[in-house]
Amino acid sequence: MTKFTAGEMLELRAQFPALHQNVYGKPLVYLDNAATTQKPQSVIDRIVAYYSHENTNIHRGVHYLSQQATEAYENARKTVADFINAAVAHEIIFTRGTTESVNLLAGSLKQFLLQEGDSVLISGMEHHSNLVPWQQICLQNKTKLLVAELTNKGEIDLEQFKQLLSQKPKLVAITHISNALGTINPVKEMIRLAHDFGIPVLVDGAQSVAHTTVDVQDLDCDFFVFSGHKMFAPMGIGVLYAKTEWLEKMPPWQFGGEMVDQVSFEETTFNQLPFKFEAGTPYVAGVLGLEAAIKFIRQYDMKSLEAYENGIVRQALEMLQTIPGMRFIGEPIHRAGVISFVVDGTHPSDIGTLVDKMSVAVRTGHHCAQPVMTRFDVPGTVRASFAFYNTEEEVEKLVKAVEKAVSMLR
Ligand code: PMP
């Protein structure tokens, strides 16, 4: 592994225009990367180039621009497949994001996999996007929602997880990395355990694709979902990866143009994979922006980026814990770039508001994971979340800002 130096990091950082601006008269310290990441110039340029010179609808046109755009769109599918090591490009379905991917899956699987009396197993740290769709489908289908509990450290209780597997749920849906706790789940092991019972597994990769290498064949997950905007790509584009055997069995979720083969008033036959799941005009610019983001990431060695980011996170944890009354919500052994905390005698949203005025952007609240807040008996947390373009200096500014906010509130 080649070490990612501070100099190289600054060069990388220089490519993100949004990081180079003042807010309230001081340089922005952007630590809300779990909500969304900033975009490098190459991604912005790709979108501008598409709308400037290439814009047209795809797949149906015989004219030059349409053929070019169709080819670019389908090449991007191959780039995404390659990025997560999918076996074939048609296993990549473009969606609006993680949320839509889960809804597609839930809407399709409920039609043939989940019957009355069955169950779906999720964990206690799921984002609402990987909880509410399953909960609602379970309510509709009279299916039971099983929940793997969390330990006090904010890790999934694997012993209880194994016991729940023995109830033979029809699906396991778990997050790779928790956006509320920072926990990296041992998904490969969990998938193996589930497969021992013949249970398919969905992995929510919203927080993992930009921070670690994902290899869906090595994980052997049946489904993997993620959002472009959390990995330096535009908002509104996302991916559902599914093994071919599942895509072949799954009925379509949305109906309309593009996903059909023959249509009459009496009946319709559906298009081949992956088009069966992509009804209507797709977000071509978003797909090309996603490809540009992947090309951006691939200029670097992911392991080096990960090691650099881990160093920043360690530094932040060490410095933050010196603040009196600091309590981390989630102290997992394997942690990604998310730090959630509360400080005794203060409210998280007051800290967030005060540090914002010091140009430090963090997030406060329940982070779309209300059951996690209930589990840890907190109204919400302050969440600082990192990307590989954050610096040690920014960590210092965060800690100083939190210290100052706490002293003002006490
Ligand atoms: N899952 C996780 C773990 C997330 O962090 C998020 C976004 N915060 C989502 C799902 C939902 O992603 P999106 O809003 O892009 O659909």
Image: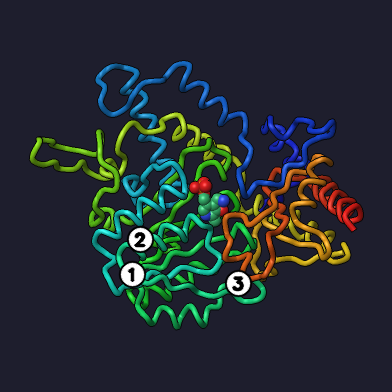
Q: Earlier in the sequence, mark 3 or mark 2?
A: 2
Tell me whether the residue at label 1 lies in contact with that at label 2, contact meaning CB atoms closer than 8 angstroms. Answer: yes
CB atoms of marks 3 and 1 within 8 Å: no
Q: Is residue 332 left or right of residue 29?
A: left
Quadrant where the image shows the C terminus: bottom right
Q: Nearer the viewer, residue 75 or 172?
A: 172
Q: Is residue 280 left or right of residue 44?
A: left
Reading the image, the residue beneath label 3 is 155
Task: Tell me if label 3 and label 2 are in contact, CB under 8 Å.
Answer: no
Q: Is residue 213 visible?
A: no
Which amino acid, by three-letter code, is at mark 1?
Thr
| Image: 124 above or below 180 | below
Task: Please tell me whether mark 1 sits on a helix, a strand or a loop.
Answer: loop
Where is residue 105 drawn, in percent x and y? 35, 54
Q: Nearer the viewer, mark 3 or mark 2?
A: 2
**Image location (x, y in percent) of residue 153:** 67, 73
Q: In the picture shown, does residue 150 fall above or below 295?
A: below
Left/right placement of residue 144 relative to residue 114 reads right
Which amino acid is tagged 3?
A: Glu
Residue type at mark 2?
Ile
Colouring method of the image: rainbow
Who is closer to the viewer here, 249 or 213? 249
N-terminal of the pair, mark 1 or mark 2, is: 2
Q: CA distance from mark 3 to mark 2?
A: 26 Å
Q: Locate residue 283, reporting x and y percent.
A: 41, 32
> Does the numbered disc 1 mark a residue whose Cβ is under 8 Å from ligand 1?
no
Would you name the residue on which mark 1 appears? 143
Residue 238 image point, x, y percent: 45, 43
Out of 353 and 154, give the one closest to the viewer. Answer: 353
Q: Secondary structure at mark 3?
A: loop
Residue for badge 2:
137
Q: Could you tell me which residue is drawn at 27 percent across and 71 percent down?
A: 116
